Image (cartoon, rainbow, N blue to C red):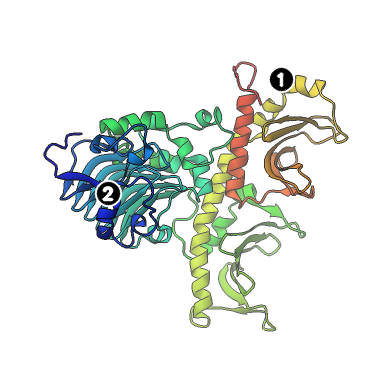
Amino acid sequence: MNLSNLPYRTTSYDEIADELPESSLYKEHYDTHWQNRVIVIDGDWILDEPLDLDAVDELSPYYNPDDYDSLPLFILVKGNMEATNIYNGETCGSCGLVVLGNLTAENIVVGGQEIFVGADLRVSGFYWGDYNHGSLTVMGHISIYVFLETDYNHNNKRFEERRNADITEYLTDDDYGGLLLGEKLVLYLKPEFSFVLDDILKIDYIPWSWKCWINEEKLFPALAKGETIFVSPEETQKRRDEISKKQVHLFPNTDISIENLLRFTYPPLFSLVCKLDKNNHPRFEMWDDNDVFYRVLYDPDDSTYSLYIQNGEEYGVLAQVYEGELHTSINTFTDEGVIDMTATSHPAHFAFLEKEFAYFCRRYEELINSRIYYLSKVNEANFKSLLANERLQDFYAQKEKNADGYVTLQKDDFILKISNEEATTARISLGEHSKYNEDGSVAYLYFHYQWDAERNCVLLINEEEDGEEYEANFGNTPRYYRAMIYFRKLQLLFPPVEEQSTNVI
């Protein structure tokens, strides 16, 4: 790092403390008893090479490799800063960066310190904040192409709402369904910087964070060399289009219409998610995270197609095709019962119906596509191939069976149970350690894969702690994705005879 022409100095924290913004964590929460050195850039800082925040000891004449406290706490830039890549691999006690002006970079991959920007932040590529010892604070406008948070502190609400912020892709570890598949991130990365699922499953049982999809051993050397880590926006869009071509697109729009209500019950697709009610009518129903209940129902007796949406325990609204005509109604759970509803008669309730109808059109499309994807992986052929695996057959023949016909194998935090006796329903169960009971015993969260010949599919059965079992609701997409990935893990552990595997459970 060439600093021969740069007006910088190394000083103590106490000497510059008054110059720090009040909203900086280094101003509010710093204890001066340790790591008391600060690097100060008195003007603008224009870097034509990457900045490794783990290697800033190069800037500090006070650095002593035997004295941790001699490392600079942070770099204070009193003007603007421009850089190619800013990064560090150490995520605990890393050197911070306080820029009082604008900060512009191609990529920022950091963790373990505060990144504070007093004006605008512009990142043309990747901002990845990792681990909860790090944070980002920006006082001005934010412009980031892809922001990735893996247990990292930032203003979540501001980012979600894009308040004074332009963020093309906002990814957080709260998006559990998304990170299980990884495609939202992999769309952007060059192939050498990402893993495929089977690579991850050779190391872990499940992708537990977006960071599982990133090949850090290749990413950080590339950042150090100033290499491009993303594909072009055109290539990203091409990848996205290829995925879209493989998906079902049910709704050309989200209007409340006869055509859209009929699309909910399109037979080849509705059969993937519906179950028969007590009247033998196919229906699909689910509660969503926003405390709203949805029910799609087809009544073949009078050719009625309906979508019922309930707002918590307050009221329910209904859009229905009956005798070839569209009807909308409301039930306020009072003596009035169900009454007709229009945008004029009940504007607030009708607005709720319009909003939730539009949302559920997209959500239902996602459910159908996730169901198709799940069944492409967890299906009759793969289930029976796994059950017939020679190692599993030998294991099943040699182990003592319990009263239900199961044999059990336990390894680390997982337990595998198998039953292929004719007297019982063929089932493969994988249980993950979820918690310890009060008596010290281990409680497992089970994924039961069970073949159902009548429905011609592999059921996913949930099991409560009290032993009660029921089929997992298709609306629980992350649960099905997790089950699909565990099933793939079992396939890798017990592959067909022609494949080789060194993995053991």
**Residue drawn at (14%, 45%), measured in percent from left and top?**
7
The residue sitting at 40% across, 48% down in the picture is: 134
Residue 300, how many percent across, how many down? Answer: 68, 59
Q: Quadrant of residue 313?
A: bottom right
Residue 166, percent from left and from top: 31, 56
**Image depth: mark 1 or mark 2 in front:** 2
Does residue 132 lie above or below 160 as drawn?
A: above
In the rendered structure, which amino acid carries the disc numbered 2? Ser
The residue at 53%/38% (across/down) is 207
Mark 1: few/some/many CA within 10 Å (<14, 14-19, 20+): some
Q: Which x, y percent locates residue 267?
A: 61, 50
Q: Position of residue 429 (x, y in %)?
A: 72, 36
Residue 77 versus residue 335 in the image, above or below:
above
Quadrant housing residue 489: top right
Q: Where the C terminus falls, by quadrant?
A: top right
Pointer 2 residue: 12
Asked if 437 appears above or below 138 in the picture, the reply is: above
- On the image, numbered disc 1 is attached to which residue? 391
Tell which of 191 and 228 is nearer to you: 228
Q: In this image, 369 relative to 426: left or right?
A: left
Query: Closest to the observer: 198 or 243?
Result: 198
Q: Is residue 500 visible?
A: yes
Q: The N terminus is located in which quarter?
A: top left
The local secondary structure at tag 2 comes to: strand
Residue 209 shown left or right of residue 335 in the figure: left
Give whichever of discs 1 and 2 has the lower sequence position.
2
Instruction: Give the class, few, some or many, for how many residues have Cα within 10 Å of label 2's Cα (few <14, many ≥20).
Output: some
Residue 78 shown left or right of residue 480 in the figure = left
Query: Is residue 242 shown to the viewer in this render?
Result: no
419 is higher (above) or lower (below) than 311: above
The answer to whether the residue labelled 1 contacts the one labelled 2, judged by CB atoms less than 8 Å apart, is: no
The three-letter amino acid code for the residue at tag 1 is Arg
